[in-house]
Image (spheres, grey):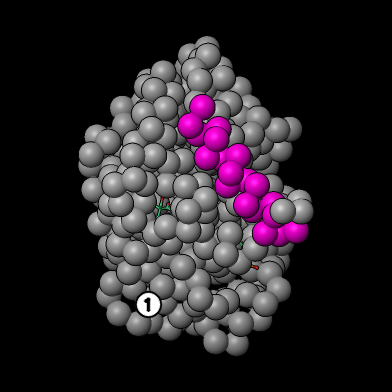
Amino acid sequence: MLREFSERIRAELPPLQRICVAGPGAIGITLATRMALNGLQVTIAARGQSLNVIQENGLQLTDVYGKHTVRVPVAEGPDIPPQDVVFLSSKAQDLASIASWTQNLIGPDTIIVPVINGIPWWYFEGEAGQYSGRNVKSVDPDGCLKRLLPSAHVIGCVAMFTADRPAPGTARSLNPLRLIIGEIDNEPRVRTEALAKILIRSGIETRVSERVRDPLWTKVIGNLVFNPLSVATGATLRELAGDSSLAHVSRQLLNEALLVAASFGARVEMSPRQLLDFTKSMGDAKTSMLQDYEMGRPLELAAIVDAVLEFADLQGLPMPFTQSVTTITRYRSLTSTGQRSG
Ligand SMILES: NC(=O)C1=CN([C@@H]2O[C@H](COP(=O)(O)OP(=O)(O)OC[C@H]3O[C@@H](n4cnc5c(N)ncnc54)[C@H](OP(=O)(O)O)[C@@H]3O)[C@@H](O)[C@H]2O)C=CC1
Ligand SMILES: CC(C)(CO)C(=O)C(=O)O
């Protein structure tokens, strides 16, 4: 099925002009604003207050290039017609509710790009091996994401920058904007190059990976090591990788995660030293999980940690440090949101 789709795409590559960004949070606003500034027809799929604010004031972004305001159409997801590209930029745990209204947006050639941290629902799609076609139970327990977001349309994506959303419709992103994209069956396709081109022209450094699961594991490992620990400690990225006592804990988590990634054949693209240095270089930014914690929102633990624990279990690998830090993190989150008394 993937091959047929690829051949059709090669024969008649549609210009990637109509872009929908579903979920105008920190990452969604950043990408949408950059693409709108590049003259693409960007439509935002939003809800509630975000929808009203964006309708009224447009999108506001402060990034490495300066301050920008753009006016873009915004609507509730089900009211938006089919698109060439749909970026999904919610938290992993909200993806099922977004996917439930994406059917109108997806035409025969639509590209779906999840810009979402963690192990994705499509991980075992388009890959041979003993787990081929398996559901990732922690993120897609009933297979509904696989049904609603067909893998032939999906391009894998890894976001290598930070952003926050101080108010609805407004984002700040002060590191260089970097994305890595790649076909989930590792087959080169023209559509991926076309997507990279529009992103690069929009000021987003984009690399096409021939093995997108490699950078994906690199990012998942970074998130697994630093995000829960940031909630447990309140520390920034610089502190998590730079403070010697926290860096010691980070290393234990890193060693556990590296073994699991290796057992799935991943070539992690940074050494432990490079990962710690890269994280330190992001400065006093808060992880997205710490931002969620401080705002009393649910944490993205299922995709970032539970899925890796699920994978570790498949290979019989223990992850005791990861389990302990996650237990503390989950406890803090549940007590702070009143779901468990302290
Ligand atoms: N922020 C960061 O620095 C980084 C984040 N990431 C990852 O990128 C992804 C997005 O993160 P981020 O932008 O920070 O997330 P945010 O929480 O800032 O934004 C999530 C967006 O999804 C929207 N949303 C959620 N559920 C629905 C729904 N049912 N219908 C419509 N919209 C919905 C939210 O709506 P509403 O506007 O109503 O809140 C919000 O606009 C996450 O996986 C994150 O881990 C990756 C790299 C860095
Ligand atoms: C900033 C970074 C890279 C930290 O792990 C991230 O992805 C996040 O905050 O979710």
Q: In this view, does 236 lie to the left or right of 82?
A: left
Residue at the image point whose x is 41% and y is 18% from the top: 263
Q: Position of residue 211 (x, y in %)?
A: 34, 31
- Residue closest to the eye, 309 or 145: 309
Residue 321 inside the magenta-drawn segment: yes
Residue at the image point whose x is 64% and y is 68% from the top: 46
The chief SS type of the magenta part is helix
The residue sitting at the bottom extreme is 56
Please identify the quarter of the rendering in which residue 66 is found.
bottom left
Q: In this view, does 298 lie above or below 218?
A: below
Q: In this view, does 280 lie to the left or right of 29?
A: left
- Residue closest to the eye, 128 or 9: 128
Q: Where is residue 99 in the image (x, y as percent from the top left)?
A: 67, 49
Question: Can residue 7 be seen here?
Answer: no
Residue 191 inside the magenta-drawn segment: no
Residue type pointed to by label 1:
Thr
Q: Where is residue 247 in the image (x, y as percent from the top left)?
A: 32, 44
Q: Position of residue 251 (x, y in %)?
A: 34, 36
Would you name the residue on which mark 1 appears? 62
Q: Is residue 91 above or below residue 311?
A: below
Q: In which quarter of the image is the N terminus?
A: top right
Number of marks present in the image shown: 1
* Magenta stretch, residue numbers: 320-338
**Some atom of ligand 1 lies within 8 Å of the CB belonging to the residue at label 1:** no
